[in-house]
Image (cartoon, helix red, strand yellow):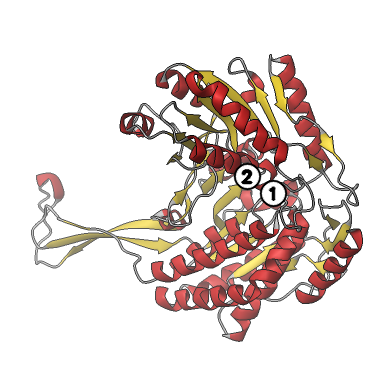
Amino acid sequence: MSTDLNSLRKDILRDLELNSVNSGVYSNGWVAKPSGKRVTSISPIDGRAIATVITGSKKDYERVVGRSEAAYEEWVALTPPQRGELIRLIGNELRIQKSKLGRIVSLETGKTKVEGEGEIQEMIDIADFAVGLSRQLHGLQMASERFEHRMYEQYLPLGVIGVITSFNFPSSVWSWNSFIAAVVGDTVIWKPSSKALLTAISVMKIITKVVKEYNYPEIFSLITGGGFEIGNLLSADPRVKLISFTGSVKSGRIVSETVARRFGKTILELGGNNGSIVTSKANIELSLKGVAFGALATAGQRCTTTRRLIVDEGIYNKFLPRLKDIYRKVKVGNPLEEGVLVGPLIDGDAVSNFLGAIERAKKEGGKVLVGGKAVKVKGLEGGFYVEPTIIEMPKVTPITCEETFAPILYVFKYRTLEEAIKIHNSVPQGLSSSIFTTDLREEERFLSALGSDCGLANVNTATAGAEIGGAFGGEKDTGGGRESGSDAWKNYTRRQTVTINWGKDIPLAQGVRFEV
């Protein structure tokens, strides 16, 4: 198995034109010798090195921002449909490279093969969405109270924006922001997670090849490096008009405060502590599948992962044994093997956090029903694997109000739907939510203003698995702002209200008179 992974490493490095040591800075070409630290990318599958990246420094950052500003001057002169054409060409190239890029995602982050390719498919889908959007960027026309006046609003590009991404969706979340921002006229600087540098470099190699081939301005830049250096430079820089940040609440607060001090704009996706309610009116088979996928996909390392399960006490003793059986049978191991549903956590710290959360849950009255241990996979002893875990909780406790990026599912009983919703809304985070029911009144109560307090609400489907067509984001400690579909494109623009007087007088609003 290790030999197979070694061969895979060589194949991926060759196919994606990666070297044993790679530049982590792209600014109108790859910077040959960035002046930052060397960071080695480790595969969580076996804990072994893939390749090394030389990251950027403040000096490299200044070059990136300057070039991005210059590219904006060219890019903004193109029409939105012309911008959309570049994204269309990029989407086509991503289709060709989908399998290759999916493999580096799986190798570097531990996603299963289907999830790795799904990550790239999401980039393709948002490219298609952005192409269509490029021909329908519109504002309202409004009635003016003044005679012979016309009033309307338009949305204009911001300029340079920064996108800071996390390891768990190392390329798709960048594309949600970048492809949409590009068609409205912005240029984009990408700072990826230091745990997924090779994925970012591979994506940039493919995308910038298209940009150069068709002679477009170099609107996409990459600078790798630590969050405390590069992330802070981006956040504090008034030249960067918007920061889209995906990461922890702790880091998000720092980004938010730093950007707010200069009156910049932010989109913050700071994680979730997502709950699913299963009522006595639920379709049990559907519910089991939805809860299992929501809780186990990507080894519990999605911001939309189901972390809390709230079950009607009338079906609790029927539902839980079947869910426990699913957990016992699920295959944990090499995510590139057929039949494996749960791959590794991203690193040793993630395993430690998993074990620490379980111990805390026990001290707070929790009972481990399934799992609860770190495991070693034969032939992959250096990997970071854990048992998918179900913990029965007597009530809401401090640990259940925290997000642990691991496959831990806390389970609660409830008597009334009002009690279930209260448990559901008891956490600081507010990203994704779901209810499983066939009762119209239960569904509508959950979707009402007194129901789910999350940015995403699902009925008879998992908390995980959002589509690109809808605006993505959450409330409360999840941060705020929206990415991806619907009218999230407006976040990457500045709104301008326009008034045109086509008459021969200057009447004033509100009936005010001013005679000179």
Q: Is residue 81 above or below residue 353?
A: below
**Residue 332: percent from left, percent from top:** 76, 45
Q: Based on the displayed image, in which of its 4 quarters is residue 39 positioned?
A: bottom right
Label 2 sits on residue: 302
**Alpha carbon distance from label 2 to label 1:** 14 Å
Nearer to the camera, 268 or 322? 322
Tell me the kind of residue under disc 1.
Leu
Sequence-wise, the earlier of marks 2 and 1 is: 2
Residue at 79% x, 53% y: name it: 334
- Which x, y percent locates residue 350? 77, 39
Nearer-the-camera pick, 422 or 18: 422
Image depth: mark 2 or mark 1 in front: 1
Q: Which mark is residue 341?
A: 1
Q: Within the image, what quadrant is residue 214 found in?
A: bottom right
Direction from residue 119 to residue 145 in the image, left or right: left
Res 219 visible: yes
**Labelled pair 2, 1 in contact (Cβ < 8 Å):** no
Q: Image quarter for residue 119? A: bottom right
Q: Residue sitting at 82 percent across and 62 percent down?
A: 53
Q: Position of residue 460 (x, y in %)?
A: 44, 40
Q: SS class of the residue under badge 1? A: loop
Label 2 element class: loop
Please rate how many residues cluster around mark 1, counting C-alpha atoms within 10 Å: few if below 14, some from 14 to 19, many from 20. many
- Residue at figure coordinates x 50%, y 63% from the top left: 126
Compared with 397, 292 (above or below) is below
**Which residue lies at the image location 58% right of the left edge and 29% below the top edge?**
308
For badge 2, the amino acid type reads Arg
Residue 120 x %, y %: 61, 64
Position above or below: 10 against 113: below
Q: Please say whether residue 270 is visible from this viewpoint.
A: no
Quadrant containing the C terminus in the rendered view: bottom left
